[in-house]
Image (tube, rainbow, N blue to C red):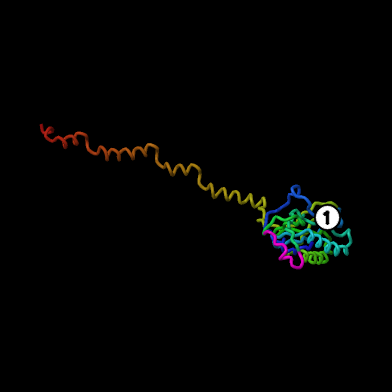
Amino acid sequence: MVRKPGRMYRNLAKMAYTRREYMGGVPGSKLVQFDMGNLTEEFPLELSLIVLEGCQIRHTALEAARIVINRRLQELGRANFRLKIRVYPHHILRENKQATGAGADRVSEGMRLSFGKAVGSAARVYPGQKILSVYTLTQNMEKVKDALRHGSHKLPSPSRIEITEHKVSGIRATHVKIAEEKVVAPPVAPAAAAEEAPEAAGEKGAEKPGEKHAEKGAGKPGEKHAEKAPEKGAEKGGEKPGEKRHEKHPEKSKT
């Protein structure tokens, strides 16, 4: 069987096809080893290979990249590095097999977009995802970068190398990623806070609590009613009741 080029399976065009229990005869993955090197020691430096485009990476491409990187890392000594593959080829690739060779275009013309038969597997990756990581010592950084650069040539997507430092406090220490410290306002000293407190209290409480009520109620409570009472009397009862009756009935008043 002639193997088709990788560009036929590179794009994320269809849904993931991963249910192996419903299909038979799925070829085994070439990628069978995911951790290599020294697996017990914690290293202060991590270099990761990150893809820049979303694509499908076949298991054969992942295995080729692993072989190239592992071969170049052997120069450091097995105890001075750890190589970890971070993806797994879950997606099953299908292909509609047709006759090949001279005159094959006249012999077999298969149906378009046919379902096909399982021919391999691939890992579906997305932009910014880590494909593999190498943990090592700080003095080995340049050699590890060179090994990752050669391994990236086996992958169908352009990639970049990310370097991360870890704080290590001994063997089997927990990884702690070093992050940038945010700028925070300096804390106020206790003596300065004590001096600012009376000033703030003096500004807020410059007036006594009773003064606010004195302004609102400067007069006595009876004065408010006294002011309103003459106004009501002047409007409604400015004249006596008898005078209003004489105006309406002038004849009766003469008699």
201 in relation to 132, above or below: above
Q: Residue at x 87, y 56 (%)?
A: 38
Q: Residue at x 76, y 64 (%)?
A: 100
Q: Identify the magenta region.
A: 100-111
Residue 230, x across and y down, in percent = 30, 39
Q: Residue at x 76, y 47 (%)?
A: 21
Task: Determine which residue is flagged by label 1.
Answer: 32
Residue 207, x across and y down, in percent = 50, 46
Q: As rendered, which of 233 and 124 lies closer to the eye? A: 124
Kind of residue indicated by mark 1: Val
Instruction: Single out the residue that lies furthest toward the left.
Output: 255
The local crowd at label 1, few if under 14, some if 14 to 19, many if 20 or more residues have their Cα within 10 Å, is few
Instruction: Single out the residue that lies furthest toward the top.
Output: 255
Q: As rendered, which of 179 and 201 lies closer to the eye? A: 179
Residue 193, x across and y down, in percent = 64, 51
Quadrant of residue 89 within the rendered picture: bottom right
Q: Secondary structure at mark 1?
A: loop
Quadrant of residue 81 within the rendered picture: bottom right
Is 198 inside the magenta-drawn segment?
no
Q: How many marks?
A: 1
Is 105 inside the magenta-drawn segment?
yes
In the image, taking residue 151 as reference, residue 252 lies left or right, namely: left
